[in-house]
Image (spheres, coloured by chain):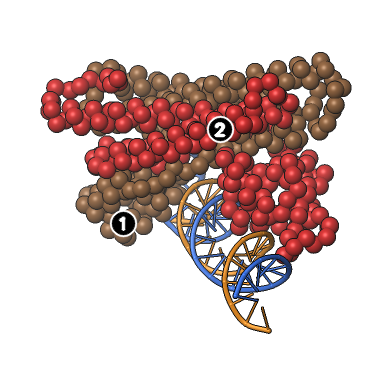
Chain colours: A red, B brown, C blue, D orange
Amino acid sequence: MSLPHAILTALLERPSSGLELTRRFDKSIGFFWSATHQQIYRELAKLEQGGLIRAVPGPPTRGQKKEYEVLPAGREELAGWVAERQDPKPVRDALLLRLRAAAVVGAAGLDVELQRHLELHQRQLADYTAIEERDFPPGKADEENRLHHLVLRAGIGLEASWIDWLTQARAELAGAELAGAELAGAEPADGEPA
Amino acid sequence: MSLPHAILTALLERPSSGLELTRRFDKSIGFFWSATHQQIYRELAKLEQGGLIRAVPGPPTRGQKKEYEVLPAGREELAGWVAERQDPKPVRDALLLRLRAAAVVGAAGLDVELQRHLELHQRQLADYTAIEERDFPPGKADEENRLHHLVLRAGIGLEASWIDWLTQARAELAGAELAGAELAGAEPADGEPA
DNA sequence: TGGCCCTGTGCAACTAGTTGCATAAGAGTT
DNA sequence: AACTCTTATGCAACTAGTTGCACAGGGCCA
């Protein structure tokens, strides 16, 4: 039940057409709630039908673009949702599952993936910190900005956590391989290498 | 495409019936890939039909319980999947969305939720570290254990990251409220409460 | 010996998200 | 005038996950 609320939020930040929303999702809200143009169009139709948003009349700019804005009912709905009780969804991560599978069928080929993921997370973190430097320089902090910054910091924290873990994981896997090859049976304890 | 692999992994760890799997999911694999009994039964049927697992003949124990075991084809499928190239799925978190929404409609009622989530994550972290102490005491470390421990540490890291962030978030929100209450009148702008 | 609970399997219907394709209007290009 | 590119909207079909319910067998116990 979150996509409609993501859309309401985006539309309150700025009234937009379906495609504009899609693009904006790709570079801000989409960092933590992505959506395809399909989902967005369908949801816009539902929201309009439900009386939460409406197509702004205005001059039909070009193509058959439709610009939407949030109605009072939509704003109320959103405000209610913000305070709603919702449990966090449990983690659902295929890479962890693959580690677990590797424990029974062998880790062949896994390190390539770990490294690739590590790089992806490093890139994501770099993107986030770039945004942080650009949009949230120290000092400037109105209420809205503080919240946006907070959200961004959650992303930064999570990426950092993955990077940290992936680094550890690669070290362990490399260690296990060596240990297996060299001592073959001495048992290398648990030790974090380096 | 991960559930079938989660099931193959669980069945390799120990052949089981549908309900047993469901229960085991609830307390280990389910930490990072949860599933209901429904999904599991459906998937078991598909896997059996696909020739990746089979119902162990054995004596029909009780009720009409069916125990499954993994066939060589299933093991191969799983080993292939471990090394497969799969991008991490982007974060999808409703709480972050709610913060973002709070930036436009006001944060009324949000702190209760932040605190509740904080407690939930603290509890989860406590569960994880309890498991860590129980199952991975320093010293004992065969190959399978090392990987299981690694997976657990990912969970620990993520929970810690959330706890850290939620603590920050609550502090900031509290600070903002105070600031808002004191200046009171600088410009009510949107919907900021109290 | 009939009622109830627990274990165990499963169908049906629904919600959410994804993928692939269709269509249409205007803008530039030759 | 025909062409093709970009912008923009949308349908249809599919996959994954969730929810609610049905039903069957065995154990227990009144």
Residue B3 image position (x, y, % from top left): 40, 47
Q: In the image, which is nearer the foreground, mark 2 or mark 1?
A: 2
In the image, residue B175 above or below residue A44 = above
Are discs 2 and 1 located on one and the same chain? no
Is residue B33 rendered to the left or right of residue B81? right
- Element on which disc 2 rests: helix
Residue B134 occupies which quadrant of the picture? top left
Residue B138 is situated, as x and y percent measured from the top left of the image, at 28, 17
Residue with the mark numbered 2:
A130
Instruction: Where is residue B58? Give x, y as percent.
Output: 22, 49
Q: Residue at image x 20%, y 32%? A: A177
Q: Which residue is mark 1?
A: B48
* Frontmost residue, A21 versus B33: A21
Write down the quadrant of residue A136 in the picture: top right
Q: CA distance from mark 2 to mark 1?
A: 49 Å
Q: Amino acid at mark 2?
A: Ala
Q: Which mark is residue B69?
A: none
Indicate the chain on which mark 2 is placed. Answer: A
